[in-house]
Image (spheres, grey):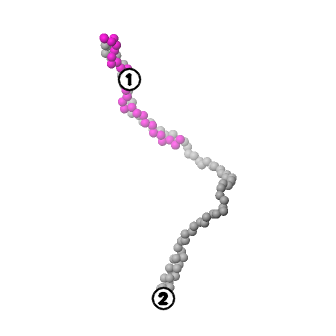
């Protein structure tokens, strides 16, 4: 029975010795801080680049347009002018262009 206690105590002692210890840095009183000049040199070597690829998808819809001509309106004999006249105009229906870029440039 004493041997078991001795082995247990040695195991506990060994495990206690392996536990971590917290360390704190001391203040640096008397050590001056500031800027210190130093030459730093470096070089740059460009890596290989792949070929430039242009790839664009263009899609468009029906693109239907209608022109409505100008209307004179109705003649007003009292004012000697047309009333309700309209200017010619273009109207569009279902018009769109979509450009999708898949290029690497």
Q: CA distance from mark 2 to mark 1?
A: 111 Å
Residue 21, position as x, y percentages in the image? 55, 71
- The tag on residue 2 is 2
Indicate left or right for 103 with 82 as reference.
Answer: right
Counting labels gives: 2
Q: Is residue 81 magenta?
A: yes
Q: Judge by depth and name the residue closer to the eye, 24 or 52.
A: 24
Q: Residue furthest front?
A: 29
- Chain part drawn in magenta: 77-105
Give neighbour class at mark 2: few <14, some 14-19, many 20+ (Cα, 10 Å).
Answer: few
- Would you place residue 12 above or below residue 80 in this image? below
94 in the magenta segment: yes
Residue drawn at (65%, 50%) of the image = 43
Q: Residue 54: percent from the left, percent from the top? A: 51, 39
Q: At x 48% / y 88%, what residue is drawn? A: 2
Q: Quadrant of residue 34?
A: bottom right
Disc 1 target residue = 89
| 10 Å crowding of disc 1: few (<14), some (14-19), many (20+) | few
Image coordinates for residue 17, horizontal then vertical, percent: 54, 76
Circle on res. 57:
none
Instruction: From the viewer's perspective, tell me whether residue 38 is left or right of residue 81.
Output: right
Lateral position of residue 16 relative to residue 92, left or right: right
Q: As rendered, which of 72 and 64 lies closer to the eye?
A: 72
At which x and y percent is residue 99?
45, 37
């Amino acid at each position: 029975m004493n041997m078991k206690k001795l082995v247990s105590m040695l195991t506990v002692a060994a495990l206690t010795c392996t536990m971590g210890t917290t360390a704190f840095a001391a203040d640096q009183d008397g050590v001056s801080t500031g800027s210190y000049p130093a030459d730093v040199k470096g070089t740059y070597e460009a890596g290989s680049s792949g070929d430039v690829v242009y790839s664009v998808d263009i899609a468009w819809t029906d693109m239907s347009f209608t022109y409505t001509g100008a209307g004179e309106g109705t003649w007003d004999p009292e004012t000697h002018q047309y009333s309700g006249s309209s200017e010619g105009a273009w109207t569009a229906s279902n018009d769109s262009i979509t450009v999708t870029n898949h290029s690497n440039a």
